[in-house]
Amino acid sequence: MADAAASAKQPASNSPGWDATTSAIIAQAELAETPELGMRNDAVGTHGIGRLDYKIIDGKVVYADSGPVRIMITEALVGPANEPNLGDLKQAMTGVYGTDFGVHSPTWISRFTDMTRQAVEYRDRRVLLAGDAAHVHSPDGAQGLQMGVQDAVNLGWKLAQVVDGTSPQSLLDTYHAERHPAAARVLRTTMAHVALRRPDERIAALRDTVAEFLKHDAPRKQFAAKMFGLDIRYDFGETHPLLGRRMPDLDLLTVHGTLRLSPCCTRRGPCCSTSANRGAFNGVSRPDRVQLIDADYNGDWQLPALGPIDAPGAVLIRPDGHVAWVGDRTQQGLAEALTTWFGSP
Ligand SMILES: Cc1cc2nc3c(=O)[nH]c(=O)nc-3n(C[C@H](O)[C@H](O)[C@H](O)COP(=O)(O)OP(=O)(O)OC[C@H]3O[C@@H](n4cnc5c(N)ncnc54)[C@H](O)[C@@H]3O)c2cc1C
């Protein structure tokens, strides 16, 4: 009975989501014959053959006359979960091009799908999931690797602080709280990408409509920010547009000269005060691991892709570059932010 009750509480899968609706074989190999280079669209989907050796001339890809190729063939039916072999590649190429162009000597052959899944919990005590172990989705939009790297950057400094006793174990729970929603959004975006490239006249009409929309500056910038993960905002409140976002990488002016901000985001999180709030960190118990920078920035304050924001008077930045506190002529909330992110002084 107890077992049944316990299992009833378990989610159906620790990684729920959506099964694959499309798959493609990809490979790097040699061809005995001259292939049709470039992309091809048909009733099944998009396919492509390109030489590894190419140049971009006047915005166009110009392939070398010979050399190994990369091949991508969308499959008519979702392929099995096993690794494809040369026979599978030949068959798929023949199905699309009517020939396999004498494909031989593959360096590698693989298959990818649009399976879309995300772990329910990124942390179970001492086990933490990051990268594709935490979330998988179609490679459309090229976001998987950067998502995984951002997971690691978010988690690394927290792990270090818990291991060296600076912060309590609960700091690790903020990893799931921050990164799970970020990946969930990417999963939705990649599902939209896959849907938009379906070979269907109605989807083609939708694609044209979206393309028209993206000719305008504001939606294009917003979309670009989403694609590059630059619009990610962790939920630390709404008092300033910088709060929870990644700090822009500025050249700050200090009494010692120009200081690039991003190299300062090491394990010692920086707190910067500008002349608008020069005494922001005075009289506050500050852990040693926080470095104080008195600096100014005379340019426009811009968030990459998102546009101009009001200049902050003072900021506390976490080691992963996200802004944990913003103070304009006030220290309100600073002591709490220092304790939350850097342990007690
Ligand atoms: C066709 C394609 C194109 C892509 N293009 C892009 C792109 O342009 N930009 C982008 O950002 N992302 C892209 N991605 C996604 C990106 O490749 C992945 O998101 C990224 O590689 C995931 O990295 P990872 O380290 O989390 O996992 P993996 O790269 O899968 O690494 C996990 C490693 O763990 C090893 N391993 C597994 N089990 C064990 C075990 N029990 N013991 C020891 N080792 C083990 C595996 O062999 C593997 O080396 C693409 C993906 C595909 C399929």
Image (cartoon, rainbow, N blue to C red):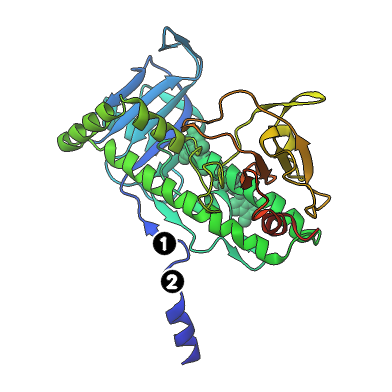
Tell me: is circle 1 under 8 Å from ligand 1: no
Q: Is there CB contact under 8 Å for labels 1 and 2?
A: yes
How far across and down, in percent of the image, does residue 258 sit? 75, 23
Q: Quick one: which residue is furthest to the top in this view?
A: 58
Q: Residue at x 20, y 37 (%)?
A: 203
Between 271 and 195, the one nearer to me in the picture: 271
> What residue is pinned by disc 2?
11
> What residue is pinned by disc 1?
16
Question: Residue flagged by tag 1: what amino acid is it?
Answer: Pro
Question: Residue flagged by tag 2: what amino acid is it?
Answer: Pro
Decide if residue 250 is on the left or right side of residue 67: right
Q: Considering only vertical position in the picture, is 242 above or below 179?
A: above
Q: Residue at x 28, y 42 (%)?
A: 195
Tell me: is circle 2 under 8 Å from ligand 1: no
Q: Residue at x 73, y 41 (%)?
A: 270
How far across and down, in percent of the image, does residue 159 sit? 71, 56
How far across and down, in percent of the image, does residue 49 sit? 39, 23
Residue 109 visible in the current orientation: no
Q: Residue at x 36, y 19 (%)?
A: 38
